[in-house]
Image (cartoon, rainbow, N blue to C red):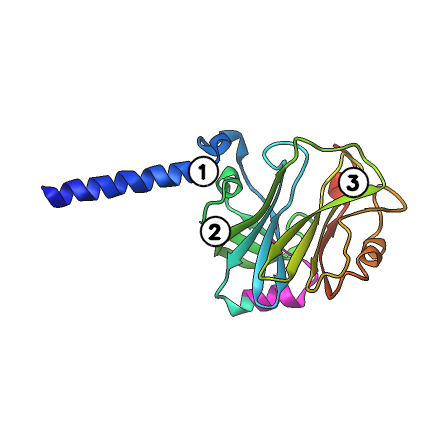
Amino acid sequence: MRALFIFLVVALTSALSVAESIPEEFSTLDPAYVGVHGMVLMNKSSTIFAYHLPFYHKPHDVQLLYKLEVKNVALVQLVRDNEIVTIKPKPFNLQRLMRGEKVALAADVYLGHFERDGILVYENMSLNFSEKLYMRKLDDVKPSSSEQFYDVVSYQKSNKIYIHRLQQAPSFDHLIHIDVEAGCLPKFNTSSAVPSRNELQYKFLNCGTMTPFYYESQDFEKH
């Protein structure tokens, strides 16, 4: 009887701890965020990142970056050796990732963009989303402008990922990895509201060891 009492106390304490760790706005999952949430996979050394492909409206109005726990060497090589690899997970509620859960998702893996003639490489691969690195809900989107703002995500000491804060259309999505930061500015002006990939890389030229991750403008030509 005493052992049962101790077990119930521990279980209740654990449940309360988990509940307290979940932001209040995500304590109840919003069914409007259930959908097929495409993502692009990015590689640095042996680390694989997954970045949600955002849009301006539900259920995709979120910029979200996760680190994956990947033991499949073939997947690491696929992402490392190709310019773009995307995944098409089975439908799920994106708020599970928005609130930082560790989640295993089944997804189809494509060489190229899964909605733009991408080639299916792996079907129903299990992917472990282990750590949320960044989340921004697109409810404070500024007007389209040539003044660009980036959020900076730090991980593993000197490693940083710069993520462009999407503006109202026309705009662009952009992520770039910096190994050694040297006077890198998260705010700068460009020649237009939607600069080229080359212009953006030039802006980061003096930042350190640079690895371009992802650039997309087609999805943000209009709301």
**Depth-wise, is mark 2 or mark 3 nearer the camera?**
3
Q: How far apart are marks 2 and 3 (CA)?
A: 31 Å
- The percent position of residue 13, horizontal first and vertical second, equals 29, 40
**Residue at the farthest left position:** 1
- Give the secondary structure at mark 3: loop
Q: How crowded is mark 1: few (under 14 residues within 10 Å), some or many (20 or more)?
A: some
Tag 2: amino acid: Ala
Q: Distance between the residues labelled 1 and 3?
A: 32 Å
Labels in figure, total: 3
The residue that label 2 is drawn on is 106
Q: Do the residues labelled 1 and 3 touch (CB within 8 Å)?
A: no
- Which quarter of the rendered picture does the C terminus lie within? top right
The residue that label 3 is drawn on is 171
- The percent position of residue 137, horizontal first and vertical second, equals 62, 36
Residue lying at 50% horizontally and 30% vertically, measured from the top left: 25
- Give the secondary structure at mark 2: strand
Residue lying at 76% horizontally and 56% vertically, measured from the top left: 184
Image check: 110 left or right of 202? left
Tag 3: amino acid: Ser
The residue that label 1 is drawn on is 22
Q: Earlier in the sequence, mark 1 or mark 3?
A: 1
Q: Do the residues labelled 2 and 3 touch (CB within 8 Å)?
A: no
Q: Earlier in the sequence, mark 2 or mark 1?
A: 1
Q: Can residue 117 be seen in this view?
A: no
- The percent position of residue 116, horizontal first and vertical second, equals 70, 49
**Depth-wise, is mark 1 or mark 3 nearer the camera?**
1
Q: Do the residues labelled 2 and 1 touch (CB within 8 Å)?
A: no
Residue lying at 68% horizontally and 31% vertically, measured from the top left: 140
- Give the secondary structure at mark 1: loop
Tag 1: amino acid: Ile
Image: magenta residue range: 75-86
